[in-house]
Image (cartoon, coloured by chain):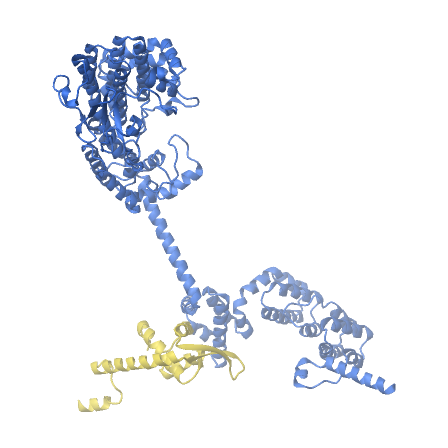
Amino acid sequence: MTERTDNHQSSSSTFRRLLATPLHRLIRGTISDHVSYQQVIDEADFDPVLAKALRLRIRKAGRRSCTRVELAKSLVPICQEQQKGGRSAGELAAALQNADPGPRGVAWKTHLQTLLESRLPTNAFHVLAQLTRRIRSRPLCRVAYDSCVAEWSKQMADGTEFAEIQAAMPDTIQLGNRINQLHCIEPVLMDDLPNEVSTILHDAVRRTRLWRNEKRDVAKELSTHFSAGLEAGASARELVESFGDTTTAAKLIRRAKVRCRPTVWWAWQRTWQLATIGGGLILMLWLVLFLRLVTASPNVIVDYVARFDDRQSAIPSDDRAWPIYREGLVGLTKDWVRTDFVDASEFGRQSKHWDTAKDYLERNDASVELFVQASRQPELGFLFDDPSNDAWLIKDVPEGVERSKLYDPKNSVLMVLLPHAQDLRRVEIILQAAIKEAAARGDAERVTELVEATFRLSSHARQTYDCAVSYLVSQAIYNSAGDEIVRLLTSDPGLMSDSQLERLTTSIKRHSRDFVIEGLVFDKVLIEDTLQRIYSDDGNGGGRVTQDGLRLLCSSDFYRPDDAAVNLRGSLPPFSLEDELTFSQNAQFAVFAPRAASLIADRKTLKAKMIELHDLYVDDIRRPYSFGSKSKFVATYDEIVNDVAVRAKLLPAVMFYQNYYHSWLAVTRIRIGRAASQTSQASWLAVIAIERYKRQEGEWPQSIEALVPNLLVEVPIDHFDGKSLRYRINPDGSPFVWSVGPDGVDIAAEKLIGRDDVYGNTDPTSGIPPGDWQLFPAVLTPPKQELAD
Amino acid sequence: MRIERELMRGAGPVAVLKLLESGAKYGYELVEQLTAETNGVLEVGQSTLYPLLYNLESQGLIKPQWQQADSGRQRKYYSLTGKGKKRLSRDSKQWQAVSEAMLRLGVISDPHIEPALEGGA
């Protein structure tokens, strides 16, 4: 039992010795004799108050017993010495008790030794604790601590109170910040260089504006340099003089030191520099383009709408048809349903809407009379800027739409909506229904009079404005009148007398026009008007794109940001000219417009291209119709549209001619329409001649050539193949007239296509309908589906 | 005698490389040696020497190393790299060629043959 206890005591003692041995001795394989810190204190035989204070402080300061022993061994002699020097145990105990908080960056051993050795008051160490907590560098904490203790001790030894010292120094926050600024030259402080040297060093290093670690490196090297100089016997002044100008030195050091920076930094630096230079160049370029854009303004010299009005004003009031048409239009009752009336006017009694139309005609008899009367006037005489139009314009304006939105004389020609052209189509439809109504009553004279009125109306429609739309409206009315003759001769061949048929033949010839030849003259005017509104004018036919011009393009119906053919590379928003732009639209416009404008060709180049396209277009559609012939206009337009750079450059031309490419003005569409109109006109004359032949000879002619020369001057031509119109007598003895149709292939009328198939082919890519076109007898029954408006 | 700045710019680096050929040296040592061994002709201040050293370092001709000196103080010693040795060899040849050319032109005189030349005259 005793043996076990001895063994236990022995192992416990070894363990304590192990704990008491410092780590560096353990590594070397030696174990210290175990002595506790309490034994060390007890052996000193201090006053109990001081012994207790020492124990408490040492226990707080170190966790390992070896640390505590080491602390005790260093503090005990100091305390003994201080007591010998006259300091009381109570005074030393109080100093130890007030050691908290400990300063940052200073070991407890050092701090406690300083605390006991120096005569500084306790609050001086509190100030030091606050100060060191403001300093970021731990080594600098130690420097500041040592410096302050030395300086303050010196001053207090000279009789200065600490309160006075504290009052003279800046507060700890300011002092801490100042020391932090010295962080990079910490080695200078560590080397304890003379003030004038460390000042110049500090100044030079600060001016280098290098990274902190670079500054430290430079400061450390220069401080060792100066130290070496001092060791070699040079004076501080000599060293400062040999150093030279600090600004130059800092500049040279920085330049050289930066060259030593890592490749990654240089790569980043170069990238950033390139990006900055690139950004700056782009900004400058944008600024130049922006100034170019905002300093250009369009110069609208010619008001083509006003010029048209001037021409119309020269027509004597008594010769003008429009005031009478207008009176008739204003007088019409409002129960007009266009689709129903179109159906009734075409198919008469066969239409389910006939009774409604007939009732409408009875109630609006006065207006019909005014239309007939107006048609007898030699000129249309329409004026755009005419206050007398207000009553008519306001009459049919949709709810919520202002008159100014419908028509504004200040608008460009592109924006003129031609509201009167639409209403002349309405007059035509009403006259057509009136013809049906008169024919139903057997009033041949009234029928003839109304057909003649419709032909005259077609001539008036041509005068609505010098543009393709007017000519197309006119042609549609003219075709409607001619088709009506064929319907009358189909449904009631004996209604009209020979003289009445003669009058109609005269009307057909008198009002015949080649709308292609006449209508396209205006397109060059349209080009001029577009250019003067988009570009500035340098007086020599040149100019650059303006802000207003770009806005005009963006507000155009043809501007579609989602359509690659006409967008400004997706950069500008579409908007209406009448609407106020939102902030984001304005910003988007301001940012992207300069670049977009710079992409667009100058006025002279664009005009040349537009004229070239115009001439190609005119050449294409004036050539005799030939199925499948290639259009040079389409090929050129395709070339422009398919090349992104060219498309952007010629954007106004692309937008302008888009209509000529895609819509009812497309080359194929116009050429088919022209051939169809010419063929229709030939067929009307032929059908009247066939009817008159029957009356004269008592039988149908055996061939179309039999009508020449007594009833026709020349053989009627099918303009789809350039040969004579196809004619035959059916097995039932009835005559049949047809055209080979747009495909140019005669299939002996085995498959027939209608009028809408011929005229309605607006998209050249959808293909030409195969089949022959029936011209006589007319189709008198409506199709199963309702006619679309 | 003070050397023109442009001339010093060419001579300084090769002089420093030459001094480092015999072994690693720290800044002050280089300043002292340059002054002493060139009779003050190639004397440089710290504001010139250290940028020069950093430039050579950035070119990979010398490499620095902090070492403890005999005095116990930390010092930054510079030593020649392989690339530095090659450069020194090349530059030395070039300076040699320049010196010979200047000698032939009479811009400089050879101290060894000067008496002979004087005697011959």
The image shows residue B15 at horizontal and vertical percentages of: 36, 79
Which residue sits furthest front?
A731
Determine if residue B41 is in view.
no
Q: Quadrant of residue A589?
A: top left
* Residue A784 appearing in the image: yes
Count the marks.
0
Q: Judge left or right: residue B62 versus residue A94.
A: left
Colour chain B is painted in: yellow
Residue positioned 16% across, 14% down in the render: A697
Horizontal side of residue A171 vs A442, given as left or right = right
Question: Residue A765 sits in which quadrant?
Answer: top left
- Depth order, front residue of A553/A242: A553
Q: Which residue is drawn at 20% across and 80% down?
A: B105
In percent of width and height, residue A267 lies at 41, 64
Task: Name the image quarter holding residue A611.
Answer: top left
Chain letter for the blue colouring in the rendering: A
* Residue under the image location 78 percent in, 83 percent down: A11
A110 and A394: which one is in front?
Answer: A394
Please indicate whether residue A453 sits to the left or right of residue A151 in the image: left
Considering every residue shown, the one lying at the far left of the view is: A709
Taking depth in this image into account, of A397 and A99 the one nearest to the observer is A397
x and y percent of residue A768 in the render?
Answer: 28, 34
Residue found at the far right of this picture = A1
Which residue appears at 22% of the width and 17% of the height? A314
**Relative vertical location of residue A598 with respect to residue A52 in this rendering, above or below:** above
Quadrant the C terminus of chain B occupies: bottom left
Would you place residue A620 above or below residue A87 in this image?
above
Q: Position of residue A523 (x, y in %)?
A: 24, 31
Which of the image's four quarters has the N terminus of chain B?
A: bottom left
Looking at the image, is A640 positioned above or below residue A372? below
In this rendering, position of residue A227 left or right of residue A150? left
Nearest the camera: A377 or A364? A364
